[in-house]
Image: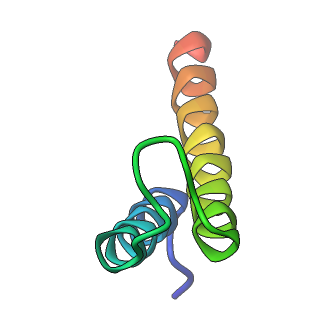
Amino acid sequence: MAEGLRERYTKAGGAYQQHADRCLACQDDQRCTVGSSLFAEFTRLQDAYLKRVRDAQNQN
């Protein structure tokens, strides 16, 4: 069974956090190339999930 959007964004957030915890270049709003890529994927998936939730609420 395919992962849901929420699970994917949560997993992406965890991947970024694990990286940032070990990467000296990733601090506050500064990110290395890998950290930037991981964070961008997390925010893309989170935005998509939140849009889906808002759209579902607006249909009711």
In the displayed image of the protein, which residue is found farthest to the front? 24
For the point 65% across and 61% down, the residue is 36
Left or right of residue 52, residue 16 in this image: left
For the point 63% across and 30% down, the residue is 51
| Number of callouts | 0
Residue 49 in the image: state x and y as whole percent.
Answer: 56, 43
Residue 48 in the image: state x and y as whole percent.
Answer: 66, 43
Residue 11 lies, with reference to residue 10, above or below; the image says below
Q: How is the image coloured?
A: rainbow
Residue 6 lies, with reference to residue 25, above or below; the image says above
Residue 19 lies, with reference to residue 27, above or below; the image says below
Left or right of residue 18, residue 11 in this image: right
Q: Closest to the observer: 10 or 18?
A: 18
Q: Closest to the observer: 45 or 51?
A: 45
Residue 26 in the image: state x and y as whole percent.
Answer: 47, 62
Q: Closest to the observer: 8 or 32?
A: 32
Q: Closest to the observer: 32 or 49?
A: 32
Residue 40 lies, with reference to residue 51, above or below; the image says below
For the point 40% across and 71% down, the residue is 24
For the point 59% across and 11% down, the residue is 58
* Residue 33 position by quadrant: bottom right
